[in-house]
C-alpha cells in the first residue's frame, strides 16, 4: 500500500507539472463579500473564451470557483493578425515566443503558404524594425517552390530585400540544425523553416527542440509544411492555409467586373490553445500591409474565351428542333411516320454475316 501511495503521488505530481507546462492548470478563485469572484492573493485571474465552463463548489463557508482553462499570458505575448474573430479563436493571436505551423495540403499551395508567411513576417517586422527574417529550406523545396521575388516583397509586403535572408541546406538534417541554432538567436525577428512532405526526421522531438529554442529567445518560429500530413508536433498553433478566390477590384464606381483584387487566403484552424475550430477568408492589403476579413461569398474570376465572348445566347433564342419548313416533308396520309426513303440510315436493321 505504501508503494502504491508513493506511485500515486508521483503520478499526480507529474500530471500537475504537465498541466502547468500546457497551461491547463486549474485556477482557484474565491468570492469576496460582495459576491463577485476575485483571484486569491498571489494568483492572477486569467480570461477564458466563451464555452469554457466554470464549476462552483462548496469550500467551507465561502464559495470557491474552480476554472480550468488557459495559462495567464500578457497581450504582448501574441502577434495580433488584426482580425478580431481569428485572434479570439486563437486565444489572443499567434504566440510570439513559440513554434507555429502553417500547413499547405498540396504542393501547388506552396505559393499561397509562402504568401501567408510573408504577410505574417510583414506584421512581425513592424514590431522588430531593424532585424532580418531568416528563411531556411532544403535545395529540394527551393527548387520545387522557388524563391520570393525581391520586387514583390517591397511592393506587396513592405519588406526590403536585405530584411529577408535565405539559407539553402543540402539535406533536411542540415536545415533542422540551422533552424535550431537560428531559433536561439535574438538577432533575427523570426525564423521560417520550410519543408516538404512528412519526413521522418521532423518528429515530435525535433519540433519540441524548435519550440523550446523559440521560447527561450522570445522569437517566433514558423514551420511551413508543404503537402504533408497533419502529424503531432509541439507547435501550439497549426493553421491550414489554401488559396481563396480573389474578389473584384474595388473602384469609386463599384466593383470592376472581370478584374482580380487583393490576394486572399482561406485559413482553417487545425490546432490552437483554445481548441476552437474555425475557417476564415482573409485578404491582404498591400497598401496598408494588413489583413482584412472577407465575409461575403466571392465568385472565382474566369478568363474570357480566346474566341471572344460567351457564345451562349439568351434563354428562348435557341430551339431544340427547327420548325417544319414544308408540309410536303411529312405526308398527311402516313401521319408522323416517315417513309422508308426518309428513315435515317442508323435506324435500319443491321445485316448479319
Image (cartoon, rainbow, N blue to C red):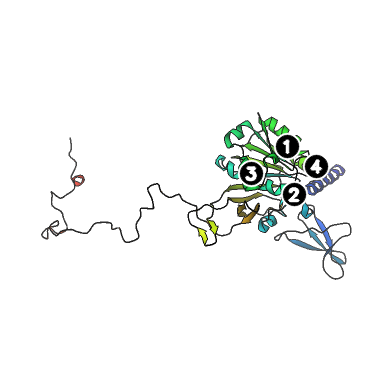
Residue where numbered disc 2 is placed: 127
Which element carries disc 1, helix, strand or loop? Answer: helix
Looking at the rendered image, the disc whose residue lies closer to the viewer, 3 or 1, is: 3
Question: Residue 252 at what x, y percent from top left?
Answer: 55, 61
Looking at the rendered image, the disc whose residue lies closer to the viewer, 3 or 2, is: 3
Q: Quadrant of residue 327?
A: bottom left
Q: CA distance from mark 3 to mark 1?
A: 34 Å
Q: Do residues under tags 2 and 4 come within 8 Å of each other at their CB atoms?
A: no
Which element carries disc 4, helix, strand or loop? Answer: helix
Residue where numbered disc 3 is placed: 153
Residue 62 vs 329, above or below: the answer is below
Residue 191 vs 336, above or below: the answer is above
Which element carries disc 2, helix, strand or loop? Answer: helix
Crowd band around label 2 with a 10 angstrom C-alpha radius: few (<14), some (14–19), many (20+): few
Disc with the residue nearer the chain's start (2 vs 4)? 2
Left or right: 343 as drawn, with respect to 189: left
Residue where numbered disc 1 is placed: 205
Q: Quadrant of the N terminus?
A: top right
Q: CA distance from mark 2 to mark 1?
A: 30 Å
Pick out the residue farthest to the left.
333
Q: CA distance from mark 3 to mark 4?
A: 29 Å
Crowd band around label 3 with a 10 angstrom C-alpha radius: few (<14), some (14–19), many (20+): some
The numbered mark at residue 216 is: 4
Disc with the residue nearer the chain's start (3 vs 2)? 2
Which element carries disc 3, helix, strand or loop? Answer: helix
* Closer to us: 299 or 61: 299
Amino acid at each position: 500500500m505504501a508503494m502504491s501511495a508513493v506511485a500515486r503521488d508521483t503520478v499526480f505530481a507529474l500530471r500537475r507539472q504537465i498541466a502547468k507546462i500546457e497551461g491547463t492548470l486549474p485556477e482557484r478563485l474565491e468570492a469576496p463579500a460582495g459576491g463577485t469572484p476575485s483571484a486569491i492573493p498571489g494568483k492572477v485571474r486569467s480570461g477564458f473564451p466563451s464555452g469554457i465552463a466554470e464549476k462552483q463548489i462548496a469550500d467551507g463557508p465561502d464559495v470557491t470557483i474552480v476554472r480550468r482553462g488557459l495559462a495567464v499570458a500578457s497581450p504582448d505575448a501574441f502577434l495580433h493578425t488584426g482580425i478580431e474573430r481569428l485572434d479570439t479563436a486563437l486565444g489572443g493571436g499567434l504566440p510570439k515566443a513559440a513554434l507555429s505551423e502553417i500547413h499547405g495540403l498540396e504542393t501547388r499551395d506552396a505559393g499561397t503558404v509562402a504568401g501567408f508567411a510573408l504577410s505574417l513576417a510583414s506584421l512581425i517586422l513592424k514590431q522588430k524594425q531593424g532585424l532580418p527574417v531568416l528563411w531556411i529550406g532544403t535545395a529540394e523545396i527551393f527548387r520545387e517552390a522557388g524563391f520570393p521575388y525581391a520586387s514583390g516583397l517591397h511592393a506587396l509586403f513592405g519588406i526590403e530585400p536585405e530584411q529577408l535572408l535565405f539559407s539553402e541546406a543540402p539535406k533536411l538534417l542540415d536545415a533542422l540544425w540551422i533552424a535550431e541554432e537560428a531559433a536561439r538567436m535574438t538577432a533575427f525577428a523570426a525564423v521560417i523553416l520550410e519543408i516538404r512532405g512528412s519526413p521522418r526526421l521532423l518528429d515530435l522531438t525535433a519540433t519540441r527542440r524548435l519550440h523550446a529554442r523559440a521560447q527561450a529567445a522570445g522569437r517566433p518560429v514558423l514551420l511551413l509544411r508543404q503537402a504533408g500530413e497533419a502529424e503531432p508536433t509541439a507547435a501550439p498553433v497549426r493553421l491550414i492555409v489554401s488559396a481563396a478566390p480573389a474578389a473584384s477590384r474595388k473602384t469609386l464606381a463599384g466593383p470592376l467586373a472581370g478584374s482580380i483584387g487583393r490576394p486572399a487566403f482561406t485559413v482553417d484552424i487545425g490546432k490552437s490553445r483554445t481548441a476552437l475550430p474555425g475557417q476564415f477568408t482573409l485578404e491582404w492589403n498591400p497598401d496598408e500591409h494588413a489583413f482584412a476579413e472577407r465575409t461575403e461569398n466571392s465568385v472565382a474570376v474566369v478568363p474570357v474565351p480566346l474566341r471572344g465572348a460567351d457564345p451562349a445566347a439568351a434563354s428562348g433564342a435557341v430551339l431544340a428542333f427547327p420548325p417544319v419548313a414544308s408540309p410536303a416533308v411529312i405526308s398527311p396520309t402516313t401521319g408522323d411516320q416517315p417513309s422508308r426513303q426518309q428513315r435515317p440510315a442508323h435506324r435500319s436493321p443491321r445485316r448479319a454475316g
